[in-house]
Amino acid sequence: GSYASPLLQGTSVIPLLTSVLQDDSEWESPHTLTPSHFLDEKGGFVKRDAFMAFSAGRRVCLGEGLARMELFLFFTSPLQHFRFSPPPGVTEDDLDLTPSVGFTHNPSPHQLCAVSRV
Ligand code: HEM
């Protein structure tokens, strides 16, 4: 049964995960790329409850398990085989990591070099 008022029934609700993913009471530096958010002193992985990219509760992403496996394969394979760096003459500090903001936050296009590790 539904207790929602007839005025609210059918209302679309769009949760903004930004409120937790960029919460400065949860993250040391919520607005910059900081891999150490997920690392302990020994470099081990740390699970953070505020990392809710897949949402939470009854409407949690149904594809989370699949997406996590895909992301693992997608990133580990190239990272095992190549060393990635900015192009010659560009330092990591030169990179502008400001996201291009639309319906989602996307990285802006960058040029990079992939040098084989083997
Ligand atoms: C990095 C990849 C992904 C991210 C970050 C992501 C994130 C999300 C988020 C935040 C929601 C909740 C949207 C809402 O507020 O209602 C959602 C819902 C959903 N996602 Fe994903 N998703 C990803 C990949 C996938 C994949 C690979 C699949 C399927 C193969 C999938 C299937 C779904 C479905 C079916 C829902 C709706 C669940 C429901 O409302 O009952 N997602 N996803």
Image: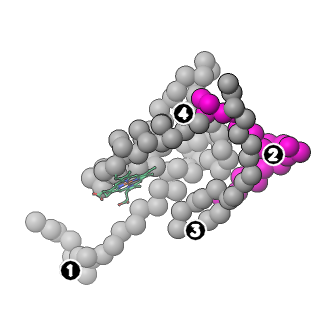
Mark 1–mark 3 Cα distance, whole angstroms, equals 33 Å
Q: Mark 4 points at which residue?
A: 76
- Rounded to the nearest angstrom, the CA distance separating label 3 from label 4 is 28 Å
> Which residue does the numbered mark 3 point to in the structure image?
102
Q: Distance between the residues labelled 2 and 4?
A: 21 Å
Q: Is mark 4 on a helix, strand or loop?
A: helix
The residue carrying pointer 4 sits among few (fewer than 14), some (14 to 19) or many (20 or more) residues within 10 Å by Cα, namely few
Residue bounds of the magenta highlight: 79-99
Q: Mark 1 points at which residue?
A: 6
Does the CB distance between marks 1 and 2 fall below 8 Å? no
As displayed, is residue 28 above or below residue 1?
above
The outermost residue toward the bottom is 7
Q: What type is the residue that disc 2 sits on?
A: Pro
Going from N to C along the chain, the mark reached first, 4 or 1, is 1
Q: Is disc 1's CB within 8 Å of ligand 1?
A: no
Q: Residue 98 magenta-drawn? A: yes
Horizontal and vertical percent position of residue 107: 64, 56
Residue that extends furthest to the right in the rendered view of this protein: 89
Q: Which mark is nearer the camera, 2 or 3?
A: 2
Does any portion of residue 50 appear in the rendered image?
A: no
Q: Distance between the residues labelled 2 and 3?
A: 27 Å
Q: Does the magenta stretch include residue 62?
A: no
Which quarter of the figure has residue 83?
top right
Viewport quadrant of the C terminus: top right
Q: Tag 2, which secondary structure? A: loop
Residue where numbered disc 2 is placed: 87
Amino acid at circle 3: Gly
Label 1: element kind: loop
The residue depicted at 41 percent of the width and 45 percent of the height is: 67
Q: Which x, y percent locates residue 29?
A: 65, 43
Residue at disc 3, CB closer than 8 Å to ligand 1: no
